[in-house]
Structures are given as structure tokens and as C-alpha cells.
Image: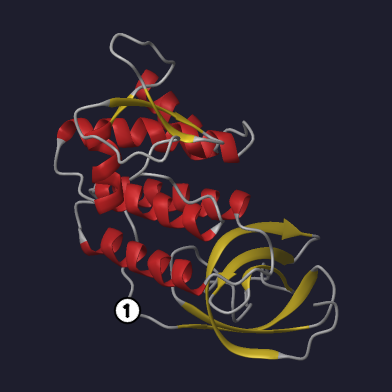
Amino acid sequence: MNLRSKVDGQPAYVLHASPFRETSLIVEVFSRDFGRMALLARGARRPRSAIRGLLMAFQPLELAWAGKGEVLNLMKAEWQGGQPLLAGEALFCGYYLNELLMHLLPREDAHQRLFAGYAEMLARLAADPSGKVREADLRSFEKALLQELGYGLTLTRDSDGRAIVADAFYAYRMEQGPVRLEHGEAAAQVVSGRTLLDIEAEDFSDPRSRHEAKVLMRTLMAYYLAGKELETRKIFRELQEL
């Protein structure tokens, strides 16, 4: 996509914005039909800029851009409304999702199902005024993200092709999937067969499944992030220490 005509009326969300020169912004967006894009918002930091207050995270936008190269020119931004601002735990969760998309999504690679799932996730986060986050929603989004990136989890068969047994225990290895552990066999990270089946069904009603799914997803994300620590996790750890 070295040469582009103008794109108009594109649904998108802002993932991150950083200052560029004195008055502009480089805005990373997640768009429905073009995936993650980098856009130059000229003059967006000026006090009287028409789009200064529009380029906020978690708000549904309709964008237009033009140009060629790695960073395109943002031509127009219109707020689509109807989305309350995130607060409390939900706000922190939203930044976590944005970090995952920023670091794992390749640029200019459309993921329309993931875009729809992200929009639904933000709507659920905004719907609860208490700012509470359901872990089931987070795990489902993480699972969908890995699936879209081609890293889909193996959850119903073990590394030998045998059906997962709910009462058995497994070590999840990146290149193999679940490896069944024999009685008394140790592993760095053990996950029950019930948890694997619950992740597949996206049923996190069991407290043990919720905990083990959280630990497993954290390990998987760390692996695909190549050891890069997310700022949201760093901040959350610091808050816990306080």
C-alpha cells in the first residue's frame, strides 16, 4: 500500500497519540477496514484546533486521511457519540487493551472481527458506572486477539492429539500446546484440563478457571510481546505495592 487514494468515512478508535513538532500529533488508530494506522494530525495541539478535543482514546470516530508512506495525513475526524467516558478500573483496562493492540497488531492489517470485538468491549466497560471489569471479558478479548494474529490456542486436544480431560493436568508449551502431565510430574506452570475447556467455552464462572486462565494468558502475552513490559501492568504493580 505505497500509493493510496483518499480514505473517507472510516470507523476508528485512537490507540495512542504523541506530540510531533510544536503543534501537531502522531496518532495511532485502530480502523475497521485498514487495521492499525499512523496518522499525522497537523495543528491538532493548537488551542483553536477543530479536532483537538476529538482525538481521545475509547471514543468512536469517523476519520478521513490521505497521502502515502508510513504516516498519512489526517484530513478529518468526527465524533460518533454515544460512548460514555471510561472511569476507574474500566479506564485502566481500556489502556491495557490499547497497549496490546499497539504492540501486537501489525500496521495496515485489517481485522474487522477484532475491531467489532474491541468496540463491544469498550461498550461493556463504559456501561458499568462503577468502573468494574469482568475478567471473563478480558480473557475473551485476549483469546480473540491471539486468534486473529494466528496464535490461536489449542484447548480441546493435547500435544499428542488426545481429547483434553477435565480432571487431568497439563503444561502449556508455546510450540506444542497442552502437554499432559503424569501423576506427580512437576512443571513451571500447571493448568487443569477443566480450565482449558472453560477457556474454549469462554465460561469463567469457576474461580479456579478464572485464576488459571489469567495466569496462562499473562504468560502467553509476555511470550508474544517478546518480554516487553506493558506500562499498564507496571503501574498496576506499583499501585499494589503502595
- Could you tell whether 2 is left or right of 41 in the image? right
Q: Position of residue 201 (x, y in %)?
A: 24, 52
Q: Position of residue 85 (x, y in %)?
A: 34, 64
- Could you tell whether 211 is left or right of 10 in the image? left
The image quarter containing residue 211 is: top left
> Judging from the image, what secondary structure is the residue with disc 1 in?
loop
Q: Viewer-proximal residue, 132 or 178?
A: 178
Is residue 38 at least partly visible in the picture? yes
Q: Residue at x 33, y 68 (%)?
A: 120
Q: Residue at x 29, y 45 (%)?
A: 199
**Label 1 neighbour load within 10 Å: few <14, some 14-19, many 20+:** few
Q: Position of residue 126 (x, y in %)?
A: 28, 62
Q: Viewer-proximal residue, 181 or 45?
A: 181
Q: Is residue 12 above or below residue 89?
A: below
Q: Quadrant of the N terminus?
A: bottom right
Q: Residue at x 27, y 63 (%)?
A: 124
- Reading the image, the residue beneath label 1 is 82
Q: Residue at x 67, y 67 (%)?
A: 45
Q: Viewer-proximal residue, 241 or 103?
A: 103
What amino acid is found at the position of numbered circle 1 in the picture? Gly
Q: Position of residue 9 (x, y in %)?
A: 56, 90
Q: Is residue 34 above or below residue 95?
A: below
Is residue 133 at least partly visible in the picture? no
Q: Quadrant of the C terminus?
A: top left
Q: What color scheme is it?
A: secondary structure
The image quarter containing residue 47 is: bottom right
Q: Viewer-proximal residue, 42 or 141?
A: 141
Q: Is residue 61 above or below residue 26?
A: below
